[in-house]
Image: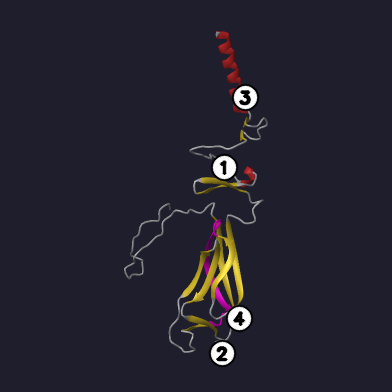
Amino acid sequence: MKKKIYITIIICLGIFLNAQKGKVGINTSNPAETLDVNGKTYTNSLYLRNPGEPTMTGGSFLATSQNGLQLYDPALESSGLFNYIKLTLTGVSGAGITDYDTKIDANNFLVILHNYSFKLNDGTTNVMLDYGDNGVNDNKQGSPDVVAFKSNGTWHIRARFTDSRIIAATSATPSRTYNNFTVDLYLMAYRRLIEKQNISDINADLGGTDGSTQTISKPSGF
């Protein structure tokens, strides 16, 4: 009996030492890496001691999405994790842009509109605003209303000025019938694999000041 136990221990020890030096496969007889699992894996915690560069992992990335891990392979994807987009819209009327559908999937991407410009069709910036759209100099100017927003599952763009019409300042008496403006929109589209979705909105009352003396709490997670 003792001899059988010794033999079993020696065999198990040999398998253990071989596993330490070679490759271990679960559900596969030909493991490709130190640990090769052919199937689903469930774990409470996952630590990557040295994940290395994408070239060391077959050119793929692991990214978190809420409570899951998803594989991102640049060779198979048509877009990146971070995507810079310059969107140029021509033939824009003096009313601006009310609702332009970018067709970018709102479920998979977060779109940020970080800059914009209004120009004439020839590229010059001789534009001004007619407040009230009445052809009278009211000494007022509408606020810019330039945002990206979600509608029916995609990201849309609004680019206009409240209570104002865009006009071409090409003469002493600018024409209010000019309807061939160019709007450049600079966007960043982030894949939701890497975007934190549960950070609360930040609200702060500056009390009529310029904000330089105000102390607010740091956003959670930063």
Amino acid carrying label 3: it is Asn
Q: Quadrant of residue 117?
A: bottom right
Q: Alpha carbon of mark 2 to alpha carbon of mark 1: how far?
A: 62 Å
**Reading the chain from its start, which is encountered first: label 3 or label 1?**
3
Q: In percent of the image, x 44 and y 53: which residue is there?
A: 198
> Which quadrant: the N terminus?
top right
Give how far across and how far down residue 100 sits, in percent: 57, 70
Q: Nearer the viewer, residue 116 or 147?
A: 147
Q: Nearer the viewer, mark 4 or mark 3?
A: 4
Q: Which residue is mark 4?
A: 180
User: Which of pointers 4 and 1 indicates the residue nearer the eye?
Assistant: 4
- Give the distance between the C-alpha atoms of the residues marked 4 and 1, in whole angstroms: 52 Å
Gap in angstroms between the C-alphas marked 4 and 3: 74 Å
Mark 3–mark 1 Cα distance, whole angstroms, equals: 24 Å
Identify the mark at residue 18; answer none if there is no mark. 3
Identify the element where label 1 is drawn: loop
Front residue of 123 and 35: 35
Choose top left, top right, bottom left or bottom right for residue 20: top right
Which residue of the protein is positioned furthest toward the front in this rendering?
A: 152
Residue at 54% from the left image edge and 45% from the top image edge: 69
Q: Where does label 2 land, which residue? A: 171
Q: Which mark is residue 51?
A: 1
Of 4 and 61, nearer the camera is 4
The disc labelled 1 sits on which kind of residue?
Pro
- What is the crowding at mark 3: few (fewer than 14 residues within 10 Å), some, or many (at least 20)? few
In terms of secondary structure, where does tag 4 sit? loop
Q: Nearer the viewer, residue 40 or 19?
A: 40
| Amino acid found under the numbered disc labelled 4 | Asn
Mark number, residue 37: none
